[in-house]
């Protein structure tokens, strides 16, 4: 049986960023590290978008950027700059093609492509079982998300940000490649929070996604029908071909995933609760968490105590309470925020970077009653 100081399960966003961060640090050069994934990461299985100020560490891999966004809905059609932020698109395949060979090249890192079938914490080590062998890790970082965990409790509602996206190529020039459609609530809401998200790469190419913030998933055909209708109505019934498709279902919950971390078994990425509860955005958070985790590892303090408290969890909790109880209010809340406040301020807020004064401005933009009701319900 092979022994490692660290085993990283999952070579996705969190696993690869963590492996790279450990691999390049002299401090960890004497540590043996195993990275395990069931997949060889050669497919473009997702597209990550995030916003940041100015230049960032992934700029060389970025596929497309936008300085303007559009937010639309029943009473809003707003095209706006997001300066000082830039909205950036990173294709999964470009990320994997960059980081996987880099990680494999570190002399102290071993890569094994196998499916993990069991993780068992023992007294002084963790046993990781794959379909064909066992590994022992002193510390294991796992990105295996168990969706049943948050569903076993009732304190924190669990919604999903779920979507189907089509990367399409149109015959006519129909897209404005300088502007990303962040949220378009003009689609029928059907009592839920439903919107279109459009990322134009050129005037004839875009990723068009039908997205919901809702507890239950839809039939695949329902997402597809909504995308077809939107393209037909919004883009002059243009002919198009579908080049790629993607599907995602990201947990939206304030459930304290970190409580499952122990000193030897630590969950990372979505499994560790690194997704922003009220939006599902995870990539940027992950890129911020990893260096903090690595710095913490160097201190030798107990891993189970590594947890970032944030007052933004309070806002996320209220919004999710509202959307869980009254899912139809989503479009009204987001529309009024974007109508009354600058998009850059909202992005700053969603990135957990605002100060209390700015947060007051944001939370007073939508109608207050649902928030007051949610607050009272939480308190009493
Ligand atoms: C289609 C899609 C689009 C998204 N778009 C965005 C976006 O625009 N912005 C954003 O911030 N977030 C986005 N997200 C959410 C989030 O950023 C991603 O899901 C991100 O990849 C999560 O990182 P992770 O490391 O937790 O999980 P993953 O990147 O999914 O990595 C998990 C890894 O574990 C491996 N694995 C799973 N089971 C096993 C097993 N039993 N044994 C071995 N290996 C296993 C998988 O193959 C995978 O490589 C998107 C998600 C999806 C699915």
Image (tube, helix red, strand yellow):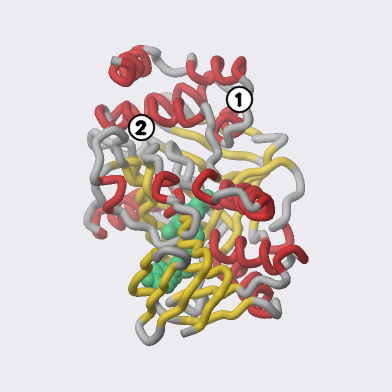
**Front in this rendered view, residue 221 or 233:** 221
Q: Position of residue 327 (x, y in %)?
A: 28, 32
**Label disc, if present, on residue 139 of the rendered structure:** none
From the viewer's perspective, tell me whether residue 379 is left or right of residue 283. left
Which quadrant of the structure image shows residue 86? top right
**Front in this rendered view, residue 208 or 326:** 326
Q: Is 351 rendered above or below residue 17?
A: above
**Front in this rendered view, residue 138 or 118:** 138
Circle 1 Cα neighbour tier, 10 Å, few/some/many (<14 / 14–19 / ≥20): some
Q: Is 152 rendered above or below residue 249?
A: above
Q: Position of residue 302 (x, y in %)?
A: 55, 49
Specify whether residue 94 is in view: yes
Q: Quadrant of the C terminus?
A: top left
Q: Is 87 rendered above or below residue 238?
A: above
Residue found at x 24% / y 36%: 154
Specify whether residue 242 is in view: no
- Which comes sooner in the sequence, label 1 or label 2? 2
Q: Position of residue 235 (x, y in %)?
A: 45, 50
**Label disc, if present, on residue 342 of the rendered structure:** 1
Q: Mark 2 sits on what residue? A: 320
Which quadrant of the structure image shows residue 92? bottom right
Residue found at x 37% / y 47%: 251
Report helix, strand or loop for mark 2: helix
């Amino acid at each position: 049986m092979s022994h490692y100081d660290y085993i990283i399960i999952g070579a996705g966003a969190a696993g690869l960023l963590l492996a790279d961060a450990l691999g390049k640090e002299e401090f960890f050069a004497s540590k043996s590290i195993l990275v395990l994934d069931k997949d060889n990461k050669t497919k473009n299985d997702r597209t990550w978008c995030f916003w940041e100020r100015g230049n960032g560490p992934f700029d060389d891999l970025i596929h497309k950027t936008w300085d303007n966004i559009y937010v639309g809905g029943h009473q809003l059609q707003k095209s706006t700059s997001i300066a000082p932020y830039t909205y950036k698109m990173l294709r999964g395949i470009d990320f994997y093609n960059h980081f996987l060979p880099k990680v494999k090249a570190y002399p102290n890192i071993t890569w094994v492509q196998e499916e993990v079938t069991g993780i068992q914490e023992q007294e002084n080590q963790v046993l990781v079982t794959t379909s064909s062998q066992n590994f022992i890790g002193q510390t294991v970082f796992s990105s295996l998300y168990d969706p049943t965990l948050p569903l076993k409790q009732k304190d924190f509602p669990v919604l999903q940000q779920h979507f189907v996206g089509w990367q399409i190529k149109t015959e006519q020039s129909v897209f404005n490649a300088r502007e990303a459609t962040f949220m378009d609530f003009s689609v029928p809401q059907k009592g839920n929070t439903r919107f279109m998200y459009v990322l134009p790469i050129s005037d004839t190419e875009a990723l068009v996604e039908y997205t919901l913030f809702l507890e239950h998933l839809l039939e695949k055909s329902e997402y597809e029908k909504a995308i077809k209708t939107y393209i037909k109505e919004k883009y002059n019934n243009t002919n198009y071909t579908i080049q790629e498709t993607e599907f995602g279902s990201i947990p939206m919950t304030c459930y304290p995933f970190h409580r499952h971390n122990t000193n030897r078994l630590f969950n990372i990425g979505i499994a560790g609760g690194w997704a922003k509860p009220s939006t599902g955005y995870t990539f940027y958070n992950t890129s911020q968490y990893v260096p903090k985790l690595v710095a913490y590892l160097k201190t030798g303090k107990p891993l189970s105590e590594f947890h970032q408290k944030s007052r933004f969890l309070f806002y996320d909790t209220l919004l999710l309470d509202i959307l869980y109880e009254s899912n139809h209010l989503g479009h009204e809340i987001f529309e009024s925020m974007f109508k009354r406040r600058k998009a850059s301020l909202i992005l700053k807020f969603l990135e957990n970077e605002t100060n209390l004064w700015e947060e007051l401005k944001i939370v007073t933009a939508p109608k207050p009653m649902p928030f007051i009701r949610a607050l009272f319900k939480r308190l009493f």
